Amino acid sequence: MVINQKITLAKEGEVVPAKTAEILKTMEIFPRNVGLELRGAYEGGLIFSSKDLAIDVEGQVARISEASAKAFSFAVEIGYPTPATIGPMLQKAQTKARALVLDAGMIIPSMMEFILAKAAANASAIAGLASGQKAQAAPAATAAPAAEEKQEEKKEEEGDTAAGLGALFG
């Protein structure tokens, strides 16, 4: 059998019909992957092996995604307005404004529900303290008095030590 001309039976990505595949098989013509397998490279006196030249595509995509998320968070944090960051920036501003209203006790009609809820929580905490029940304090609130007690003990010890040294040396 002699091949007279070159013919493309199927383009890249197309499925080869079963009848055509059978004919090619009988003629012992099998599909091939044509490409370049890079085993090394030489540049400026440096030799790079194939493992040095390999690119971890999934790792690169993950790093780019992480960098994008960090850049977005940074843009929101510094107040850099873009169409993508303006929504989160407005939400952040609204949250801070609500916290300011609650902390300052300002009377604003749209915040009355939150102000009343805070007042009710404070009232129940005061009622619990007045009735002798132990109040559930925040960890920071209980840590501060303990730290003050330690500082007072330390000052007393320093005073005792100084008094003893004064008596020793006259």
Image (cartoon, rainbow, N blue to C red):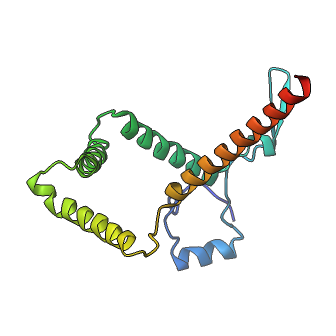
Residue in the picture at 49% in, 43% down? 70
Residue 121 point in image, percent of width and height: 30, 67
Residue 47 point in image, percent of width and height: 85, 31
Q: Toward which corner of the image does residue 128 lie, by quadrant?
A: bottom left
Residue 9 lies left or right of residue 94; in this view the side is: right
Residue in the picture at 31% in, 71% down? 124
Residue 60 point in image, percent of width and height: 60, 47
Residue in the picture at 46% in, 39% down? 71
Q: In the displayed orientation, state which residue is furthest to the top.
A: 44
Q: Quadrant of the C terminus?
A: top right
Seen from the viewer's position, the closer of residues 166 and 91 is 166
Q: In the displayed orientation, state which residue is furthest to the left.
A: 109
Residue in the picture at 53% in, 71% down? 16
Q: In which quarter of the image is the N terminus?
A: bottom right
Q: Compared with residue 143, is residue 30 higher up or lower down, i.e. above or below?
A: below
Q: Is residue 41 visible to the viewer in this orientation of the structure?
A: no
Residue 110 lies left or right of residue 168; in this view the side is: left
